Amino acid sequence: MFPAILKPKTSGDLARLCVIVALFGLIAFGALRYDNFLSSFNMLSFLRYNSMFCLIALGMAFVIISGGIDLSVGAVAAMASVCAAMLSNHSWYAGLAAGVGAGLAAGLLNGFMVAKMRIQPFIATLAMMLAAYGTALLLANNQSVSVSYETGFTIIGQDDFLGFPIPAWIALAAFVLGWIVLERRPSGRHILAVGDGEMTAKLMGLNVDRTLVAVYAISGALAGLAGVILASQFGAGQPTEGIGWELFAIASVVVGGTLLTGGSGSVGATLAGALLLSMVFNILNFENGLGWISLSAYWQSVIRGGFLLVVVVLQARLNKHSHEGAAA
Amino acid sequence: MLLSMQNISKSFAGIPALREASLEIAPGEAMALVGQNGAGKSTLVKILTGAYTRDSGTIRFGGRDVAFGSPAESQAGGIATIYQEINLAPQRSVAENIYLSREPRRFGFLDRAAMREGARKVLKTFNLDIDVDLPVARFSAATRQMVAIARSVTQNARLLIMDEPTSSLDEREVVVLFETIRTLKKRGVAILFIGHRLDELYAICERVTIMRDGQTVAVSDMAAMPKMELVRHMLDRELAAFQAMASSKVEGPEKPVRMEADAIGSGVRVRDVDLTIRQGEISGLAGLLGSGRSETARILFGDDRFDKGSLRFEGQERRYREPADAIADGIGLVSEDRKVDGIIPDMSIRENMTLALLPRLRKAGIVDRARQEEIVRHFIKALGVKCASPDQPIKELSGGNQQKVLLARWLCTDPKVLIVDEPTRGIDIGAKAEILKLLRSLADEGLSVLMISSELEELLAAADRVTVLSDGRSVAELPRAALSEASLLAAMAHQDAEHQNPAGNVS
C-alpha cells in the first residue's frame, strides 16, 4: 500500500496521500501540545472506542466506490447490537453471530433492492435505515438490552489481546482483508469498474448485479460487527444508538479521498480519514483540559464539518488541476 | 462467410425497427454499414451482440447458428464492440481495462505483473508505448480507442464492431487507427465499420451494406459504388408530398445579412464552416449524419465556444460565452431532441411556452398571469396549436403540436434568428407541411430562420438557400436557383481535393 501511495499517479492518489499526511500532522500536533496525548492509555482507549466507526467507514467505502451509498449502517449497527445482546447469554459466539448475521441479512436485502429491483441506493438504504431502527426498537422493547456478563461476550469489546484492544484487532483485520479484496483480488477491481460506470462494466462482461449485492452485504456485515462491539463495550444492546453514524462514515470516506461518484478510492486512506475525524474529538478533550478554552462536545461536529469542507474543496482543486495537466 | 445474418426483423411496441434486414461479413474483411438515423443500424448490431433479441431471422457466426443472450456472451463467442465513447472504465488503469473480467490470476489473486506485461506487449503490436498503470481517462480519445481494440484482441475477437470510431479523432489519429485496422485484417479479423464519413469508408472498407427504414437496401463492393449512388441509397424518399409547397417567392435582390460565421471551428466536429443567415430568409443547413450540423448550431447559440474563425451578428463581432448571451441578441434554438432538451412533459402548455419569457413576465417579482395568459392564447391561435386548454400537460399533445409550442416559446420572445434543428422529426406528414409553412410565413415577416434538416425534400421545399456541411466543413452554399436533389446529393457526397484522403488509398 505505501509504496504505491507514495508515488501518486492520479489526483485521487494525491488526495489520499494528503489525508495520511494530515493524520500524522494532527498526531504530531497533539503530541507536541498535550502531555499525555501519546500515552498508551489515551491511544488505546481512543482505538478501542473508535474501532466500530472505522468498521462502518470501511463498509461505506466499498459501497461508495461501487457508485452507491448506504444510509442504513447506523440503524443496522443498532439493530445488530440488540440482536447480539439478546443472544449473548447463550455463548459469546452466539452473540457475535447474531449481530453479524443481522447486519449481513440487512446488507443482502439492500443489495437485492439496489441490484435486482433497481431502486436508487439512497432510497433503498433509507428504507432499510427506517426499518432497522424500527426492528431494533421492537426487539428491545424500546430500552437497552443488557448483555450477559457470564459468557465472555463482553471480552470482545472490553479486553486486550497482546496489550492491544480486541476491537482494534478486529478493525485491523477487517482493513487488511478489505485492502486485499480491493487491491489484490479481481473482485475488487470489478467493484471499482462498476463504480466507474455500470453500463460500461456490463458491456465489458462483468457481473454487475453480483458485485452490487456483494458490496452492500459487506457493508451490512461490517455494520453488524460494529453493533456487536457496541453491545459488548457498553454492556447493552442500544436500539437508539447509531444515529448519524452513516454520516460520519460517509464523511470519513470522503476525507479519505474517495469520490462520491464512485470508481475510485482506497482502503488505507479511508482508515486514515476515519481516524482523522475521530481524533478531532480527542484533541478537543485535551484542549479543554488545558483550561484556556472550554468548548462543549457539540463543537466537535462543527469542527468535523469544517474539516470535511476543507478536504472536499482541496480535492476539487486537485482534480481540476490534474485534469488540466492531463497526459496526452 | 464469418457472419451471416438473414431476414432479421425486430419491432418495438409494434413499430418495426428492422424488416428482414441482412448482413454478411467474410473473415479479414472490413464491411461498412451506413444509413441515416433510424435506418436500423444500431438495432441490427445490438441484435448481433445480444443486447436485443430478434423477433425472427437467423444468425450464423463462425459456421454455427448463434443467439447471444447478452453482450458478455457475444464477447465470449468472439465478437467485440468498440463503442463511440463509453467502452472503458475511465478511472481504471490501461492494463486493468484491457484485462477486466479476465484478469490473470495467481492463487486467486491478481497477477499484476502478468497484467502489465501482457498489456505492454499487446499495445506494442500497435506501436503504442504508454504507461499502462495510468488511468485511461488521462489519455486522448485515440489512445483510449487503441486500448479498447487491444482489449478485444486479447479476447481473441474474430469480429470487431466499430461504431463511428473516428468521430472524436483528428486526422493524424485516424491514420493510426486505420493502420491498426489493416493489421487486424491481415490477422483475419473481420471489421464491421459503422460510419458516416464517406472518404474514410472508401479508404478502409472493402464492401458496404446500406440500410434504410429497417431494411438492407444495397450490398456492394466499395469500388463498384460511386459516392453519389451511395448517398442516394441512404436518403431515397418520396418527394411528391412536398413539391406542392415549394416557395412561391421569386428571386429578388439579396437580402441583408443578419448573422455570419466565417471559417468557424471548434474541436474535431466543426472544422471550418462559413455560414450566412439573411434577414427574412430560411437558410438550410444540410449534411450527412456526423457532418457537424447540430454542433455548428450550438456554436451559433453560444452553447459551445469556437476556437477558430469569427462570428458576426448584424455586422458586429460576437463571441458568446453562454446561450444567455445569444438569447440577448435575439437568437433562439429549437433543439433536435424535443424529449430530451425541449419540452418539460408534465408542465402545461402555458408554462412550457413561456419558459424563456418568464424573466420578462415578472411584475414585482411574480409572474404576471394575465399577460402570460394573453400571450399564450395569442400563439396557440396564431400557430394553430390543437389543444383542449392552455393548461393541458404538453405530453398529451401530438409531436407536431409539441413542436409548435416549442416554436412559440422562442417566438414570444420576439427573436431575430431562430435556429430549428430537425424541426419535423417524428411528426406526421400533414403536420410537417404545416410546420414548414409556419416557418415560411415567419421568414416572410422578417425573421431569419436557420433550418437544419436531414430530409432533402424538406430543404428543397422550404429553404431559400442551403449550406452543405461535410465532415465539419462547409463545402457548398446553394442559392434557391441552384437547389435540386442532384445538386444537394452531389454536395453531400463531396470529396474535397485539398482535404487529403485521411488514410491513403483504398487498401
Image (tube, coloured by chain):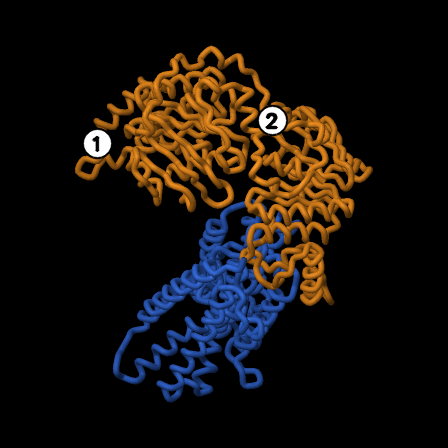
Chain colours: A blue, B orange
Q: Residue most toward the bottom?
A: A35
Mark 1 closeness class: few <14, some 14–19, many ≥20 residues within 10 Å: some
B426 lies above or below A320: above
B227 and B40: which one is in front?
Answer: B227
Disc ID at residue B231: 2
Chain bearing tag 1 is B
Which comes sooner in the sequence, label 2 or label 1?
Answer: 2
Residue under the point 70% across and 66% down: B111
Q: Nearer the viewer, mark 2 or mark 1?
A: 2
Horizontal arrangement in the rendering, residue A267 relative to residue B147 (left or right): left
A189 lies above or below B31: below
Residue A239 shows in the view: no
Q: Quadrant of the C terminus of chain A?
A: bottom right
SS class of the residue under badge 1? loop
User: What is the quadrant of residue A214 in the picture?
Assistant: bottom right
Q: Quadrant of the N terminus of chain A?
A: bottom right
Locate residue B183, reporting x and y percent: 73, 48
A314 lies above or below A279: above
Q: Which residue is mark 1?
A: B368
